[in-house]
Image (cartoon, helix red, strand yellow):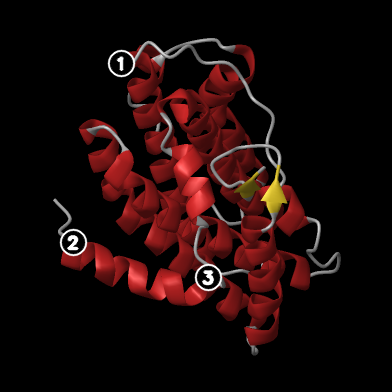
Amino acid sequence: MTSQTQMEQILAPINQFLHCATPDAWVTEAKKPENLPVILIDHLLCELKAGQSAMYLLRKYAVDAKSSEILQEWFKPYERFAYRKQGNSNSLRGKSNISKSIMAKSASPYSQDLIDKMMLLIKEELHHFYQVLEILEGRNIPYHPIPAGRYAKGLLSKATTHEPNTLIDKLIIGAYIEARSCERFAKLAPYMDDDISKFYVSLLRSEARHYQDYLMLAQQISGGDITERVEFFGKIEADLIASPDNDFKFHSGVPL
């Protein structure tokens, strides 16, 4: 069990990294019982998108053709549930682990570190997807696909379009998304039912590590000073969080 002191230690670098805290108005809206379905369903889809983003990075930059196919197959049961409502927690049990080897492509300039960190992240995100689905089913909350909010799209729209800066920008964006998720789980946990509260607290360590891994990879691949780009995306991220938003989601801005 994560103690209050441990939570504070996990959150200290996160809060320093983010350019603003989640507004109280968002927390007030998010803790309303009638908004629990959208919070949980959007969280479920965010876990899938986080895993997909890491998978796309591996397929584009790091792994060979056979590994690319293996990665695509790994995601299919989750995508079938999310987009076609096929399957349930029973059919997804144990699917977050992968037994086949993922190999780097021979011409890849990126280190094994990118593969190792993204593979661990994918496994954890898919397991979290399964855990959120269990919570939905346990509460008899029917799943239905919902459209994504503006948050990730707003960040990705500002990424550079030439390499390797595109990859570096996407890694920095990944760091902000994971850091914000960590901060929001901590904000919401005190207002949730006990099982959800414990689940959210249990996610803090992995989300914090994901943010650090993304940032470390961005620094490694850049080989130079990325402070300016980190600041650039920090301001964009804070604006998306602190500005009015008429589409309430897990990463949305101030509710209208």
Secondary structure at numbered mark 1 = helix
Q: Are there few (<14), some (14-19), or many (20+) residues within 10 Å of tag 2?
A: few
| Residue at the image point whose x is 49% and y is 33% from the top | 39
- Residue located at (45% from left, 51% from top): 121
Out of 44 and 244, give the one closest to the viewer. Answer: 244
Tell me the residue that label 1 is attached to. 138
Residue 71, horizontal then vertical, whole percent: 56, 38
Q: Dot 2 corresponds to which residue?
A: 4
Q: Earlier in the sequence, mark 2 or mark 1?
A: 2
Q: Which mark is residue 18?
A: 3
Q: Nearer the viewer, mark 2 or mark 1?
A: 2
* Residue that appears at 43% across and 69% down: 14
Residue 152 badge: none
Residue flagged by tag 1: what amino acid is it? Gly
For the residues labelled 3 and 2, the Cα–Cα distance comes to 20 Å
Camera-nearest residue between 52 and 198 = 198
Disc 2 versus disc 1: distance between alpha carbons?
27 Å
In the picture as drawn, the residue positioned furthest to the bottom comes out as 225
- Tell me how far mark 3 sits from mark 1, CA to CA: 34 Å
Residue 149: quadrant of the picture: top right
**In the displayed structure image, the side of residue 200 where residue 75 appears, left or right:** right
